[in-house]
């Protein structure tokens, strides 16, 4: 069975933690357990996790202080809070924190598994957004560097090797397109009834489209400097892709 994600259960109730860890493992997840907030923090610092399931009344989390500190330890990590002693105060406080769910023990297994899956998919979407943003930023920097060189020394032969520029530009553009494809798939899993054409209207897609336009413009503007058939072919392919998705 393929691994679906890595989960940390932080709960001082050993029977609950081990039983639900075994349940998650049976469904394809990797699952670790910690009996208190101190050990959970250490494990989060040392290992990448896709989801935290935390008991509210375990040592180190009586006032949800562990959850309040979580963004500084593992930014964006989703949290499912569980408790056998629900109070209005903890319920209200949890809504003010970035938690994926609030479940009462004993947790309904079907609801529990559904919430786990949805939380991990949302976290994967969050990470894809971050990765896509980083790639787009690098691509914009590369395109800007070409414009700077052209502006500073328009009559001097380019000091950047066209093959190197071509390699890294194509690599970044293709990586951004792959990120967009992965993001679309993740969103489709999270919202199966949503149409793919609607997903392509997301803000990140608009940003990617703008970067592709910038790439086409820069390739056209610097064509006389590089005089590369490969770059001309790249510009044609980008224009064709933009027209198809426009």
Image (cartoon, rainbow, N blue to C red):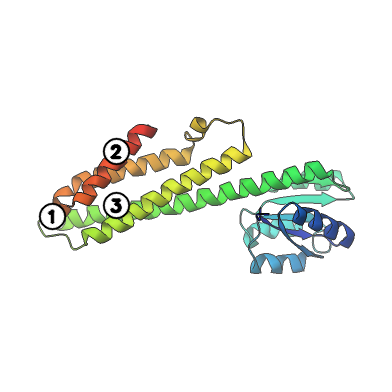
Q: CA distance from mark 2 to mark 3?
A: 16 Å
Crowdedness of circle 2 by 10 Å Cα count: few (<14), some, many (20+)? some
Q: Is residue 57 visible?
A: no
**Marks 1 and 3: in contact by CB < 8 Å?**
no
Residue at image position (35%, 44%) is 211
**Residue beneath disc 2:** 239
**Taking 36 as reference, is 85 left or right?**
right
Q: Position of residue 104 (x, y in %)?
A: 85, 46
Pick the residue in front: 74 or 69: 74
Look at the image and tell me in which quarter the N terminus lies: bottom right
Crowdedness of circle 3 by 10 Å Cα count: few (<14), some, many (20+)? some
Q: Which mark is residue 143?
A: 3
Q: CA distance from mark 3 to mark 1?
A: 16 Å
Residue at image position (78%, 65%) is 34
Pick the residue in front: 174 or 47: 174
Q: Position of residue 120 (x, y in %)?
A: 66, 49
Report which quarter residue 41 is drawn in.
bottom right
Q: Is residue 148 visible?
A: yes
**Residue beneath disc 1:** 154
In primary-sequence order, the first of circles 3 and 1 is: 3
Residue at image position (57%, 40%) is 187
Mark 1 secondary-structure assignment: loop
The residue mark sitting in front, 2 or 3, is 2
In primary-sequence order, the first of circles 2 and 3 is: 3
Q: Position of residue 190 (x, y in %)?
A: 63, 40
Mark 3 secondary-structure assignment: helix
Question: From what the image shows, is residue 189 above or below residue 2?
Answer: above
């Amino acid at each position: 069975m393929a691994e679906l994600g890595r989960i940390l259960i932080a709960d001082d109730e050993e029977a609950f933690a081990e039983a639900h860890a075994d349940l998650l493992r049976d469904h394809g997840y990797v699952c670790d357990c910690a009996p208190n907030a101190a050990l959970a923090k250490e494990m989060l610092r040392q290992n990448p996790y896709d989801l935290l399931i935390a008991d509210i009344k375990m040592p180190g989390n009586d006032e949800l202080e562990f959850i309040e500190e979580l963004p500084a330890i593992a930014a964006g990590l989703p949290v499912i809070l569980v408790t056998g002693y629900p109070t209005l105060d903890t319920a209200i406080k949890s809504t003010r924190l970035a938690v994926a769910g609030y479940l009462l023990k004993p947790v309904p297994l079907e609801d529990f598994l559904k919430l786990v899956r949805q939380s991990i998919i949302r976290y994967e979407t969050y990470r894809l957004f971050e990765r896509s943003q980083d790639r787009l930023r690098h691509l914009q920097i590369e395109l800007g560097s070409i414009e700077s060189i052209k502006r500073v020394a328009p009559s001097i032969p380019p000091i950047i090797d066209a093959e190197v520029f071509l390699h890294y530009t194509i690599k970044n553009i293709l990586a951004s397109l792959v990120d967009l494809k992965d993001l679309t798939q993740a969103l489709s899993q999270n919202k199966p009834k949503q149409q793919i054409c609607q997903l392509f209207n997301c803000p990140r897609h608009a940003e990617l489209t703008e970067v592709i336009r910038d790439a086409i413009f820069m390739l056209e503007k610097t064509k006389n400097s590089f005089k590369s058939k490969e770059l001309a072919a790249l510009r044609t392919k980008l224009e064709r892709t933009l027209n198809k998705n426009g």
